[in-house]
Image: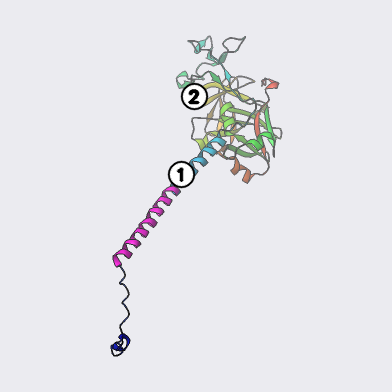
Amino acid sequence: MTELQSNEGSPPSEPPAPPVPNRSRRLLSWGMTLSAIVLASVYVQAQARNLWHECMMLQGEIQESQRQAVVGYLNIAPTTTYADPPGDWYRDEADQSLLWSGWKEGDGHPWFRFQHGDIDPARLCRPTSEYVSRAVDYPLSESGGGTIWRRMPSETLVVGHTLQGQNCVYPVALLGKVQVINDIVEDHPFLIVVNLFLPHQAEYSVFEAAVDGRRLTMAVTGYFQDRKPLLFDRGTESLWFEENDVLRAVAGKLKNKSTARVARLAPVTWSTWLNRNRQGRLLVGADRSRGVPKE
């Protein structure tokens, strides 16, 4: 009997059982995959935070660069003086009191003169500085566009008001240099005054600039009284001081005369002002070739 014949009566053999999956190996693989995903997610989030931080820093640097951009306002730099005040910077002389007004080449020490008691020297201070602001007497402006208009960064701070039907705007940086602007809008005189001691939203004011039908042009004395600038008019050298909502002459020929405040001006960005006023008159500097007004 052959081998084939000897197996004919035997039951058929069963196929081999499949191998049992290794559960521990599968769990380990899943754990490693999940850990890799978590680590990758943490890395991506960390890099995203770094990129966001760098982006914000770059944006801040760009904005700061724009704020510091040289716009090129015309003839607004202060003059330089190294003159020391005399020891008797305030003194009584005969029937008058004298207040030192600075140093002028060729003239020596000029003085403001007024009646006794008009000014209390105890209320005055004169910041020590070698720079003397020059008021704008003959404004230069651009309307609806121009070289400086286009050069103004969007973040530049300005103050503006509607005067005689015109949207007038003044750069804060320019105002800080000159402190006083003698402006004329549609033949109407205005005075824009800066008080750097006041809060930012209240330090800029517009006043009428005429008394008894005559225009006043003003400049800074260099003194502050009660933390407010003491001004003088060019015609009589009377001394003026802000009281409530008026600018009042407190000493000199025009004593007790006053001009009314037109408005307080709150700073906004140049882009904000442009969104509200597509057309307007931008003050960009001073014409110094015309000298100083006599009144």
Amino acid type at circle 1 is His
Amino acid type at circle 2 is Gln
Query: Could you tell me residue 84's position as x and y percent?
Result: 51, 12
Q: Earlier in the sequence, mark 1 or mark 2?
A: 1
Taking the view exactly as shown, the residue that stands out farthest to the bottom is 9
Give the camera-side residue of 92 and 130: 130
Magenta residue span = 23-47
Give the camera-side residue of 200 and 30: 30
Query: Could you tell me residue 139's position as x and y percent?
Result: 67, 29
Q: Would you say the residues marked 1 and 2 are in contact, meaning their CB atoms lie under 8 Å apart? A: no
Q: Quadrant of the C terminus?
A: top right
- Please tell me whether residue 153 belongs to the stretch shown in magenta: no
Query: Could you tell me residue 70's position as x and y percent?
Result: 60, 31
Give the prevailing secondary structure in the magenta stretch. helix
- Please tell me whether residue 41 belongs to the stretch shown in magenta: yes
Per the image, the residue denoted by label 2 is 225
**Quick one: label 2, few (<14), some, or many (20+) residues within 10 Å?**
some
Q: Dividing the picture into quarters, in which one does residue 209 lie?
A: top right
Q: In this view, does 139 lie to the left or right of 44?
A: right
**Quick one: label 1, few (<14), some, or many (20+) residues within 10 Å?**
few
**Could you tell me which secondary element the residue under label 1 belongs to?**
helix
Q: In this view, does 225 lie to the left or right of 287?
A: left
Q: Distance between the residues labelled 1 and 2?
A: 47 Å
Q: Quadrant of the N terminus?
A: bottom left
The image shows residue 257, relative to residue 58, as above or below, that is: above
Give the camera-side residue of 14 and 267: 14
Disc ID at residue 145: none
Q: Dividing the picture into quarters, in which one does residue 277 lie?
A: top right
Per the image, the residue denoted by label 1 is 53
Count of numbered circles on the image: 2
